[in-house]
Image (cartoon, rainbow, N blue to C red):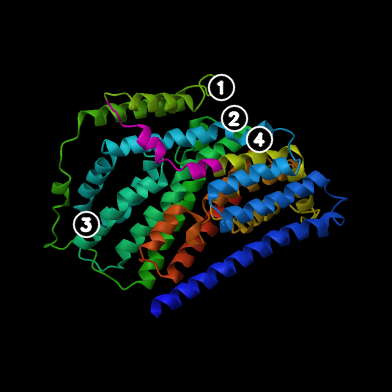
Amino acid sequence: MQTNLQACKTEKLQQYRYLKDIVIVFGIIGGYFLSKDALSHLFTNDQLLTLALLIFAVYLWTLAPIPTGISSFLVIGGMLALGLVSTVEEAVVGFLSSALYFILVLSLISKALAKVGMDNAVARLLIKLSKGGAHYIIIGLPIFIVLLPIFLPSAVARFQIFLPLVNRLNEYYGFGEKSIFKKYCMYVIGMLNQNATMIIFTGGGFSVLAYQLIQDFNVANLSWLGWFLRIGPPLWLAMVIVAVSVWFFLRMTTPKEDWLLKKDINLQLEDERNESIPPRFWVVTGTFLLMILTWIFTDHDRIPLVLPPMLLVVFYALPKLNLINNETLRKYDWENFLLLGSSFSLALLIETNGTAKVLASQLMRLIPGDANVLFNIFLIALLVFLLRFLFTLPSSAMVVIFPIAVSYAELMGVAPLGLAFLVVMIIGGMMVLPIHSPTTFYAYETGVFSKKEQYSIGALSSIVTLIVAVLAATFYW
């Protein structure tokens, strides 16, 4: 009886979702025809169709009524069916972006690093640090997270390395299941970890995507070091402010605990990971560091950014190492590959047919004529912040919002690079809801945070990042 009742509820819920999806789709179609005449003096017919397709794509990417990979085909097909592009090659131009393949090869390299024990090496360092007491971890873990994107370009991989260590250290220190120690560490490996991805553009998929957009839209030609020097200082400032604030917030909302390392704590964790480091670890790590040095010291116009990691993937696939094989490729997230490719195509379409510029010109009407630069930048920052709520994935939000922001910068007379980094920091730093980034979601799913704590910490982190980004765009970038 109970099973039948549950099945009936599931069926009704599914019917409701189908009905909701149908209403949304027909609402988009109806909205296009109803607004066609009213907006014809502002937009051309192609631009209106592009806007309708954009809204439909946001719906597909956010609510996911069909699999993500299939929705990507639907977006590309929509460009062709609506006559927004004249050839198939124009519709799939986003798949020619080097960012797609850069993200692919970095993901494969991350898998190779994990196979040779990079996670164990990191664990050893953290365990040695833990012998000094919990306060050493509280200080040292954020430093690890900030530096680790250089060596492990995947926020999810970094989270997976640290999660079991945090759980075991919390137990060995004798703290409760929802202790201040565990909550703070979860904040670090969840939210702070996501922000750390942006410090270098090779730190993860989102930062690679942002770098490629800055290149594709001719905003700037940045080197590895140039990106780091621009976004590193303001991002570090924001992270320090938030990390300290979160610590004091948790001290106020969580019962106090003894922060002295207890005498009877079993710290045999180090012995468990005391296995010898295999020789190929040094080979793999050495070649990986050589790749980073190539990024830093070579001219990207002469040596494309994606070339060193491509060659490194080939090296790791050699029979002697055999760290990357067909099975590794099959396990790659190809749905995300299709999503990024189709969203790149849509972003280029928005830019080339003038839709982004018209939208930006309409936004200019919101600004008072005598407004100063700081107010103008704050307004666009607020708009980006609000638009970010429409997207679950930061990469989707970046691809849609970036062209509009760049066009807005040109009309407003503000340096495009400043607004570009503003958009990067706000979109990448948005964590109000757990779904706003994978690692934030994983940290919330552990059940350590209450809803109030998640929303409070997420809102604090997002707002501080926004304020620092506005100040940096006005006075630094």
Residues at circles 2 and 1 in contact by the CB criterion of under 8 Å: yes
The crowding category of the residue bearing disc 2, from other C-alpha atoms within 10 Å (few below 14, some 14 to 19, many at least 20), is some
Q: Residues within 10 Å of mark 1 (few under 14, many from 20)?
A: few
Q: Residues within 10 Å of mark 4 (few under 14, many from 20)?
A: some
Which of the two discs, 2 and 4, sits closer to the camera? 4
Residue 337 highlighted magenta (yes or no) = yes
Looking at the rendered structure, the kind of residue marked 3 is Gly
Relative to 29, residue 91 above or below = above
* Badge nearest the viewer, 2 or 3: 2
Report the residue at 58% width, 70% height from top.
16
Would you say 4 lies left or right of 222 here? left
Q: Which residue is mark 3?
A: 133
Q: Secondary structure at mark 2?
A: loop
Instruction: Choose between 247 and 182: the one closer to the eye.
Output: 182
- Earlier in the chain: of badge 1 and badge 3, it is 3
Q: Position of residue 204 (x, y in %)?
A: 45, 41
Can residue 257 be seen here?
A: yes
Earlier-in-chain disc, 4 versus 1: 4
Say whether disc 2 or disc 1 marks the residue closer to the N-terminus: 2
Q: Is residue 184 left or right of residue 360?
A: left
Magenta stretch bounds: 321-338
**Residue at label 4?**
217
Q: Nearer the viewer, residue 318 or 197?
A: 318
Check disc 1 and report its element: helix, strand or loop.
loop
- Taking the image as shown, residue 139 lies to the left or right of residue 297, namely left
Q: Which residue is mark 2?
A: 221
